[in-house]
Image: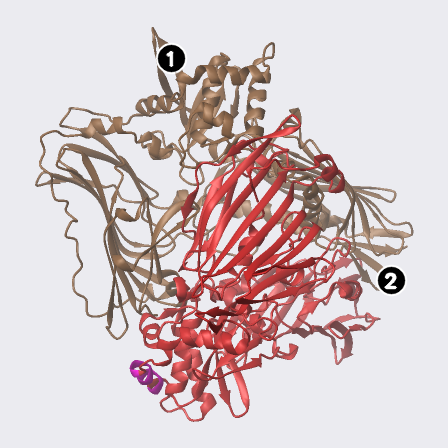
Amino acid sequence: MKRILNLIWILSIVTLKNTVAQNYVCRNYDWAEVKSVQELTAEEKKEPSVVLKDLRFSEYIYDNNGDLELYYTRHRLIHIVEQKSLDESNKIYIGVSSPNDVVTFKARTISLAGKIQEMYKGDMKLVTEDGSQYMILAVEGLEIGGELEYFFTLKSDVNYFGTEYLQGGDFIRKESLKVISPENLVFASKSYNGLAAAKDTLIEHKRYLEVTAENVMPLPDEKYSIDNANRMRLEYKLSENNATNAHHLFSWQDAGRRYYDVTHRFEDEKKAISKFLDKLKLKGKSQEEQVKALENYIKTEFNIQSTGEEESMSKLFSKRYASKTTITSLYILALEQLEIPHELVITSDRFHIPFDESFETWNYLDDMLIYFPGLNKYMDPTSYFHRLGAIPFQNTAEKGLYIKKMTIGDASNGITTVRYIPVTGMDVNYDRMEANITISPDWKTANMKTNREMGGYEDNNLRAAYFYAAEDKKEELVKSIFSGWFGEEMKATNTSVANFNMSSDEVNKPFIMNGDIDVSSLIEKAGDNYLFSVGEVIGKQVEMYQDHQRVQPIEIGYPHKYFRKIIFQVPEGYTVKGLDKLNINYVFKNDKENDMGFVSSYTLEGQTLTINGEEYYNDLYMPISEFENFKKVVNAAADFNKIKLILAKK
Amino acid sequence: MFRLNKISLVLLLFVALGSSAQPVVNVEGIKQKYPGIGYYTIKQNEHVEIKNSGSKLAIKSTTESSVLLLNDHAVLNSERSIYYYNTFSEISDIDARTWVPDGSRFKQVKVNEIFTRKPAKSGIFYDDFMEKYFYYPSLRPGSVISLKYDEEIFDPHMLPSFYFGGNYPIEQASFSVTFPSSVKLKYLYKGNPDAVKFEEKKGKNETTYTWQSMDVPKFESEDNAPDPSFVVPKVVLYIDEFENNKVQEKVLPDVKHLYKWYSTLLTDVWKEDQGDTKKLADSLTAGISGDDAKAKALFYWVQDHIKYIAFEDGLGGFIPRPASEVQRKRYGDCKDKATLLCELLRAAGLRGYRAWIGTRDIDYTYAELPSPQVDNHMITAYNSGNKWYFFDATADQIYFDTPTSMIQGKEALIGINADSFLVVKVPEMSMERNKILSDYKISISNDTVAGKANEQYTGYVKENVYARLTADGLSKVKENAIKGLYIGNNKHHVDTFSYSGLTNRDSALSFNYKFSLMNYVTIADDEMYLNMNLKKPYGDDIIDIKKRKNDRIFEFRYVDEGTTELAMGKYVTDKLPPDRKYEGKDFGFSIHYEKADGKIILHRKLYVDTLLLKINQFKEWNDFIEQLSSAYKETIVLKISK
């Protein structure tokens, strides 16, 4: 997508006529001679590796024609403390769009004994992985206690937006990033997650935007956090061209116009589109029905595939595949012909890089959605796992650009506003489970009639997985879901699944799975009595028992709630003991309403024991100070999972 | 590990064929026969044509396939690939079409653009593996996709093989080869003799062999299953000899010539100057006396200091780098590591040899198939006294006298010198060498259990635990060790955890820690219930006999045993659970409770003494698991003594 945004017309904004090509600062970049490895501090020695130096330069210069060029230089020095970091560091991968991007590359290893081995560009190879190309190098002579140093310069496509992470999985002693540009080009920047603000200086007709950091700790992986989005990073963008007196470049309005153009690239194929729409027989249908029919057709008949082949609407109709952008264009152009009010919505993945309205970088513009004001519903036009009314939760609970077509006279264009994309609440995202349990007369198995109803995101894409699975794989999938719940030794019979047809109205109903499950592992023998692991009926739960210092605040995907009902027939001739443990009540409130909680209770009538439980998380974000409470609720479910009842002979 | 089985790999991954003739297919019949099927291979044919110019062989294989799409969502699967190694073969004349149903006939749409890329391959840093890929257009349920392409094979040592089986059922599969009388062609057929029909047609100047099979069932891939090559019928071709300028030239008549070919590829390696390597060997063995002690030091050094990076370009898939280069670069693949270690051993005056070997996922012996398809790996064989040791330096943390688990029981082709070799079988490690030994001493207070644990791991078990513990670096070993513990109900707190022997290959890895298990004891009135089985390995490992289609493999034989010792304190119990045991030849367990001196001691042992569980053993296995899991369910009842 970004590539499409960077079409030539943007270049005209920054082209400078009558210039003389300049040398870029990093043209003769080289390293100093080195004789030995560096000493580490006691603290550094505890890390698997230490990045002693990580210097980055993003340099924009004009060539002879006055066209802008971008050179990206990176220089790293890594001290290897142990085996693991040796395994990770002895291969270098540099992402490129072509092997010719690499202008310079040099690497060397410094052994403990001070022996130096150098490697060059010619030692690199090109590979493709998941559609991206990399220049790779196997590092020679690297050892524990030794160091790897390398630098490279890439000539890359000019991009006016940069995202650089200054925190990762390794300890960094010293790092810096410089954005260097001709005097007339001014870059704006914003620092995130505790990174100091970048400083802007002008030296000999060049601008230097610079940020540095020292002794940066790695960010640990933590459950219920948005790791990547919490890393220190700098966003920067071209904001002014003094040579043309252009200010406030690349605004959200500009982005909106650009997306408008991109999605209207095939506007002149109106006829092909109307022929396509005729086939769908939409006449006389309501707006919502029309949208659903269009979406179902596209998601059933077309495949999203970026192939590098030339695209058009007519090619899409005959080949039945095209890139995301082209398929989204089809929706937009079709909706216009159908005169259904809509807005194109562009936003980011909140877990990867949350959208920040206050800094207009187009690097936040990753995912395309469509909003229907008349229906007050959102759609992800290219996700096979979602249908009108549901979009990936990663794109919700943050803002995005809303782009609407505006026609004045003969001219049309996109008008942009920045608005919130709401997340659905726990009334929508729920998992309701009911189990009716009896014990077999020989005490070998617990026989459960189970019923499970999953709403909203709580279907965890099982509905889509089931819908898209080949017919002869569907049963296996259901069994694997049950065995994920009750363990491998369970036997499932009479299983049934309902509301899985993604292309029908079933998609708006809860996804339902029923089955009769026999499990033997829930019963233990205790002399003349038995123990019944009633807690295991709710399935394995996340456990957070061990203590660790929490580093990141809590963030979850969406508010959600679990309802659990267990009806247990106590075998005749036995009484049930140990029921007190079933009464659990952990509820935490914020100012307004119940925030999160785990509540369970029971009733016993004759030989019928009924247990009701609720667990819910209503807040998406919680500060570290709330972590202990959060853990209590999570662990309450895990504790419940461990409850055993005693079935004592009367 | 180096490559091989290349061509067969392609066939299994890729099921498809094609020409411009209308597909003939009975869709309704197929739907009835295979309800719910998503894909169905109508034909899967490969024809190999060998020609002899008098001085050179030209080998061309033509693959043709067609697949019927019945899956409602077939359109989502439009990308297809053909894989090959570009040093050894070339792909040409790709003809791919989609046949879209149009009344009673099909309308064809040809694929116009074919792309080539160098794909990354798991476990391989770089090699000459290449990919041609393209996108089938106009897909919908009921479409047929066809593919036809040629592959020119450059080296007569690397003839194709063919598998009668794939990811979908196949209506008609055939493999054929045509060769002139000046070529002596051989083949190996493995699999059910009735599954495939063989036909020989002898012409005046050439012969054609055809293997054909109809209604080939699909291959079910399952966890812990043997490689498809053990299950699916297959044909492997190889050339015995051919007439080259009127003289018979031997290619692969027997293992002797296979070795000869390998040895020729190693011409430069045999002659290598050992300058640096000698220096290194001297420094590593200085002060060490005894051959085995020296060999051990060298083996461990290579494991520790030469990192595994598989960088195999072209013939580099067969030829190791010189030892001195590996020593300098500090990385290598299996051949490189084997060669450096071999040269180090020799430099120290010891008997070290390079040895070719096939890992356990290869189904051939050198005697039945003298072809490079038999091996895919290289190790160092070391001879001491009358004993062979098999050093696989691609392992990180393996003991001197232990081959890696993946080569147990396999034949090693040991290169003694440029002309002579031996084929020696690598031993399978006994279960006693791979052990988990865990002893717990516990006491109870209310519903909490407090305990002290000692756990020990040896052999392959230790290797696996080592990998898990060190995955996030040495500073995280303790954390990962604690995270991986599973005791009782798993609601545990672990204190004062310590470990030893992690990086010492000659000793067991041991954990010592204190723990408390909360809410583990179930209390009712004046009784308390405690399950002393703090670990329940294999407790729910029932095999679904109706569903499972393949044998089950175990990475290694092993024993898991130990004790749980409960200090009774103020508690008494009337009765201990009965002793339970199951003593099979290949697997079994025993659980025994003992009362002694204010304690109850649970003794348990579980063993798996086989590498392969055959389908006909599954019932016995399930009996074993049922008995085991019922033994795990026994609880002791405690009361406060009055």
From the top left corner, tell me how far across and down residue A542 is, in percent: 59, 50
Q: What residue type is labelled 2?
A: Asp
Q: Cβ–Cβ below 8 Å for labels 1 and 2?
A: no
The brown-coloured chain is labelled A
Residue A528: numbered disc: 2
On the question of residue A588 being in view, the answer is yes
**Front one among B136 and B186:** B186
Camera-nearest label, 1 or 2: 1
Query: Which residues, given as a range, are shown in magenta?
Result: B275-282
Q: Name the residue under label 1.
A: A406
Q: Is the magenta stretch mostly helix, strand or loop?
A: helix
Q: List the single residue furthest toward the top.
A: A409
Image quarter of the N terminus of chain A: top left
Measured as percent of width and height from the top left, residue B114 is found at 44, 41
B257 sits left or right of A583 in the view: left
Chain letter for mark 1, please: A
